[in-house]
Image (tube, helix red, strand yellow):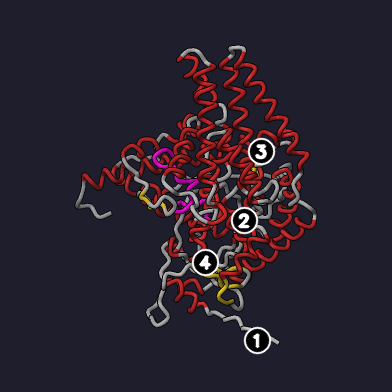
């Protein structure tokens, strides 16, 4: 009979010591995983892992990975923990750690206290959210019966230099703290017992949804999708060959718009659940058919799913100099994703003050920015170089070259005779898919950007930072699953054609644990987004006037 090796039981202090030594340690299913060696092999990039260092990543890992992948992770196990884990703030987010022989107090000692609400001076605040009044706190979670109403922020006119200072202080500090406190009041307590109960109920719901077969892909639905794609592509070719170039561009733009949703599905392994097959599907659709890198999207999107709506960390809301959805951007914040300071320079100040008016026109150029990001990702070596994803970069570069061969050379140069027609074709085909950028930003731009601390559970954080869009079932094809972003963020590997069925179960879960479920019509959601952008623009103008006053009056204490 062979000898068995006892697993080492790690204390919180011992895990802190490992992280202080520079180790990348995460907790999954009560197992302590030291994943330093895996960083360079992770197909989803290293940043997603870095944001989980020192934290219980069980729910994030389960949501974003297959059971086989979770089993593979256990080879990095160095021990286990006992009892509920109190999260550290990861080093990438500014967390400080002590070596085992260092007895000096650490800011991480503060996280052991799982009190009901985090102190305002220890929590970074963020943007406004559509909120409910106290009488609507227990609202019925049904889009046909109730809607959460937004409370309008009070504002006053600025009549003097003194008023400018007072208004700036109110808007940029007190108002931010008020919104933070609003989040703390509106959502369940951050104490350990409450958050653990939410986690248990969330995991039970996951098992229930699996038992009901909602993780099984509906391939008949994809058959209908493919018929739609082929029809649009055929109409594009017919109009192109008959000289109706502008109409041809419209159909090509619609083709790209619809393909985006299936590329999104493939990126989450939500079609066949096979890493290789779904990757091939993603590269064919995104790179060859659309000219965009699925690898760039996955690296970006994985981080977005883990640190949703955190201004310093989530690349999906880091759009300076064109958009700012949080006051933090006024101070040229450091992006941990891009590893650079996002400068709030004079150009950004000018654009942000007009962002509510420029929102839709700016999104018309969204695809051009995605081209830049795609080539930057592939040419600057950000793609995986080792492990099972080593070949992605070469497949993507080949596919992008083929895209520009058929679109740039064959369509634009060979099939369209004049420069004027080529320009019209190019711009129409790129503007028509613009609604997808609206659909993407709609889910998050008007939601909370507060950082209410590491005690918040994964499901509560996703529900606090994400909204769903209410639409009739017959219109699901237009939104492509993006109307169910709340459910998608909770269960990202669930095939999109099952999200509508899952919605009622998620609503029941929210009602049971007391977390508001954000659900708005498409028009209503857009109104919230524009209103929020306008409010941030107003605050940017006040901030600028305050800066100018301080420059003109250097002796004034402010």
Which circle, 3 or 1, is nearer the viewer?
A: 1
Q: Does the CB distance between marks 2 and 1 fall below 8 Å?
A: no
Quadrant placement of the C terminus: bottom left
**Residue assigned mark 2:** 64
Q: How many residues crowd around disc 3 within 10 Å: few (fewer than 14), some, or many (20 or more)?
A: many
Can you say whether 96 is above or below 404 in the image? below
Which circle's residue, 2 or 3, is located before the other in the chain? 2
Which circle, 4 or 2, is nearer the viewer?
A: 4
Which circle, 4 or 3, is nearer the viewer?
A: 4
Residue 350 shown in magenta: no
Report the disc number at residue 480: 3
Report the disc number at residue 420: none
Magenta span: 307-324
**Residue assigned mark 1:** 3
Which circle, 2 or 3, is nearer the viewer?
A: 2
Can you say whether 430 is above or below 31 in the image? above
Q: Is residue 7 left or right of residue 353?
A: right
From the viewer's side, name the closer residue of 45 and 314: 45
**Residue assigned mark 4:** 35
How far is disc 2 from disc 3 in space, using C-alphas? 20 Å
Which circle, 1 or 4, is nearer the viewer?
A: 1
How far is disc 3 from disc 1 in space, using C-alphas? 55 Å
Which circle's residue, 4 or 3, is located before the other in the chain? 4
Q: Position of residue 1 (x, y in %)?
A: 71, 87
Q: How many residues crowd around disc 4 within 10 Å: few (fewer than 14), some, or many (20 or more)?
A: many
Which circle's residue, 1 or 4, is located before the other in the chain? 1
User: Helix or strand or loop: what does disc 2 sit on?
Assistant: helix
Residue 148 visible in the snapshot: no
């Amino acid at each position: 009979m062979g000898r068995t090796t006892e697993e080492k039981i790690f204390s919180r202090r011992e895990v802190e010591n490992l992280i202080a030594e520079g180790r990348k340690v995460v907790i999954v299913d009560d197992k302590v995983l030291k994943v330093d060696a895996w960083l360079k092999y992770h197909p989803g990039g290293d940043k997603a892992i870095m944001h989980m260092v020192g934290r219980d990543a069980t729910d994030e890992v389960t949501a974003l990975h297959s059971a086989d992948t979770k089993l593979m992770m256990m080879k990095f196990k160095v021990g286990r923990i006992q009892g509920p884990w109190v999260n550290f703030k990861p080093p990438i987010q500014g967390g400080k750690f002590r070596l085992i022989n260092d007895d000096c107090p650490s800011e991480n000692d503060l996280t052991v206290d799982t009190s009901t609400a985090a102190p305002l001076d220890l929590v970074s605040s963020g943007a406004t959210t559509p909120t409910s009044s106290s009488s609507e706190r227990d609202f019925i979670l049904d889009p046909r019966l109730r809607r959460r109403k937004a409370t309008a922020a009070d504002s006053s006119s600025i009549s003097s230099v003194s008023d400018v200072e007072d208004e700036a202080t109110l808007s940029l500090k007190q108002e931010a703290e008020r919104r933070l406190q609003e989040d703390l009041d509106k959502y369940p307590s951050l104490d350990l017992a409450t958050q653990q109960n939410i986690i248990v109920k969330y995991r039970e719901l996951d098992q229930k949804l699996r038992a009901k077969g909602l993780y099984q892909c509906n391939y008949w639905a994809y058959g209908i999708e493919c018929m739609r794609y082929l029809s649009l592509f055929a109409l594009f070719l017919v109009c192109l060959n008959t000289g109706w170039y502008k109409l041809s561009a419209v159909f090509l733009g619609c083709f790209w718009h619809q393909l985006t949703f299936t590329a999104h599905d493939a990126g989450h392994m939500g079609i066949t659940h096979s890493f290789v097959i779904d990757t091939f599907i993603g590269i064919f659709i995104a790179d060859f058919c659309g000219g965009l890198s699925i690898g760039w999207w996955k690296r970006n999107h994985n981080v977005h799913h883990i640190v949703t709506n955190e201004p310093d960390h989530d690349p999906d809301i880091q759009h300076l100099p064109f958009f700012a959805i949080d006051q933090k951007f006024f101070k040229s914040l450091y992006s941990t994703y891009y590893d650079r300071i996002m400068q709030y320079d004079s150009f950004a100040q000018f654009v942000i003050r007009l962002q509510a008016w420029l929102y839709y026109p700016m999104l018309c150029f969204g695809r051009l920015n995605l081209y830049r990001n795609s080539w930057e990702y592939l040419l600057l070596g950000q793609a995986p170089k080792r492990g099972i994803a080593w070949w992605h970069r070469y497949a993507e570069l080949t596919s992008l070259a083929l895209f520009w061969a058929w679109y740039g050379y064959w369509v634009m140069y060979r099939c369209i005779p004049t420069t004027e027609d080529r320009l019209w074709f190019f711009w129409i085909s790129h503007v028509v898919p613009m609604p997808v950028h609206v659909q993407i930003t709609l889910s998050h731009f008007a939601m909370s950007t507060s950082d209410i601390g590491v005690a918040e559970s994964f499901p509560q954080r996703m529900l606090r930072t994400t909204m769903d869009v209410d639409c009739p079932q017959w219109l699901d094809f237009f939104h492509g699953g993006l109307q169910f972003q709340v459910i998608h963020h909770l269960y990202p590997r669930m095939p999109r054609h099952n999200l509508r069925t899952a919605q009622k179960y998620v609503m029941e879960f929210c009602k049971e644990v007391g977390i508001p479920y954000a659900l708005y019509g498409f028009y209503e959601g857009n109104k919230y987004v524009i209103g929020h952008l306008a409010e941030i623009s107003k605050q940017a103008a006040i901030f600028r006037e305050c800066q100018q006053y301080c420059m003109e009056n250097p002796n004034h204490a402010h």
